[in-house]
Image (tube, grey):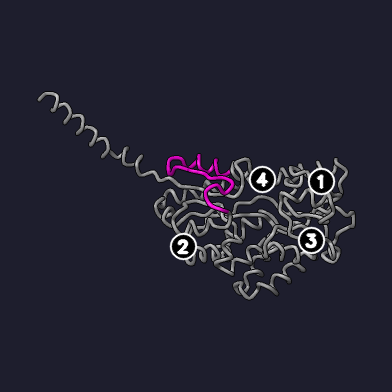
Amino acid sequence: MQLDRRRLLVGGASLLALGSPQAAQAQAKPKLRFSAAFPETDLRAEGYKALAAAMKDDFEFEPYWSNTLFKQGTELVALQRENLELCNLAPADISKQIPAWSLMTSAYLFRDYDHLKKTFASDVGKEFIKQARDQLGIEVIRPVYFGARQLNLKPSKKINTPADLAGIKLRMPPGEFWQFLGESIGANPTPVAYAELYTALQAGAVDGQDNPLVSGRTMKFYEVTSQFILTKHVIGYDMLSVSKKAWDGLGTAAQSKLRAQADKVFDENAAKYDAQENEAIEFFKKEGKQVYSPDQDAFRTFAQKRYIDKYGKDWPSGAIEKINAIK
C-alpha cells in the first residue's frame, strides 16, 4: 500500500512537471527543416548557422545542405505543402508561379548588394514580397546575397560593349532562363554542365564562362582563361523564405526577432563575399590575367531592352523604372 502511494505521488509530480510553464515552453519550441542547394562549406551556410544560433530559443534548426532533402527547384512546392519550413529560395523558382517575378531575375537590374537590399525594403520590393505571400502562401523575409556574376574569357579580345561578345561561345547553365541571360549580354550561350566546364574551356568547346570571381578561383578556371571582365551582369541572390504555418507558429515577437537577426547576419555575410571578390581580383592580377571593367551602362541598356521585349508584359507597370531610380 505504501509503495502504491509513492508511485502515485511520483506520477503526480511528473504530471505537474509536464504541465509547468517551463516544460510547455520546451515542448512548444518548433523544429524548422531548412533546405539549400549550396554545400555546408558555402559562406551562406555560415550565415544560416549564425541565424539559427541567434534564434535557438525560438526554434530548432534542422539543416539539409546540397539538396539532400529536396531536389533543387522543388523547394517552393515543399514550402507550400508544409513539407518544409525554411528555405533558401531562388527568385527564378518564384517566377515560375508568379511571372511578374521574372523582373527580379533579370540581368542588370541590381547594381550591387546595397541596391538589392534597398529595393526589397522599398515600396516596389514590398509589393513583390506581398505577391509571394498572397499568391504562394509563403513568407519571403529578405534577399541572401552571394556575389556578382562576371565574365571570364579564354580569348584576349578586349570586351567593352555587348557588340564585342558577338560570336563568343559563353558557357551558361542548362535551362531556358540561363540561356536567355547569355543572349541578353550579347553572347552566344552554350549549355555545359558545371562539372565539365574546366575541360570545355581547356579544349576550346566554349570561349568563356560567367560565375562569381570566387568560383573562378576555387575551380581554377583562371588556369585556362586569359581575362576577367567585371560586367556584374547579375547580382546573385536567393530569398530567405518560410512556410505560412511555420511563420504563423512563431508569433509576432519571434517574427520580429527573425527579421532583425537575418538583416544583421546577412549584411555581415555580404561584406565577406565582397571581401573575397576583392581578394580574387588581386590573385588573378598576380597570375598575369587581365582584369577590367567594361562599359556597364552599355551592357545594362542592352540587357534590359532584351528582357523588356521578352518578359516586360509580365512586369508591374513602372516597376523597373522605380527600381532603377533607387539610390
Residue type, label 2: Gly
Task: Work out whether mark 2 precedes mark 4 in sequence or the reverse, and give the earlier one.
Answer: 2
Q: Which residue is under mark 1?
A: 222
Give the Cα distance between marks 3 and 4.
22 Å
User: Where residue 274 sits in the image (x, y, percent)?
Assistant: 70, 46
Specify start and end residues of the magenta stretch as a single range: 47-71
Task: Work out whether mark 3 precedes mark 1 in sequence or the reverse, and give the earlier one.
Answer: 1
Q: Residue at x 83, y 61 (%)?
A: 168
Which numbered dot is residue 271?
Answer: 4
Q: Which residue is under mark 3?
A: 296
Residue 27 or residue 316, whichever sits in front: 27
Q: Residue at x 82, y 56 (%)?
A: 205
Asked whether 75 falls inside the magenta stretch, the response is no
Q: Secondary structure at mark 3?
A: helix
Task: Work out whether mark 1 precedes mark 2 in sequence or the reverse, and give the earlier one.
Answer: 2
Task: Work out whether mark 3 precedes mark 4 in sequence or the reverse, and give the earlier one.
Answer: 4
User: Where residue 110 sits in the image (x, y, percent)?
Assistant: 68, 60
Disc 3 crowd rating (10 Å Cα; few below 14, some 14-19, many 20+) is: some
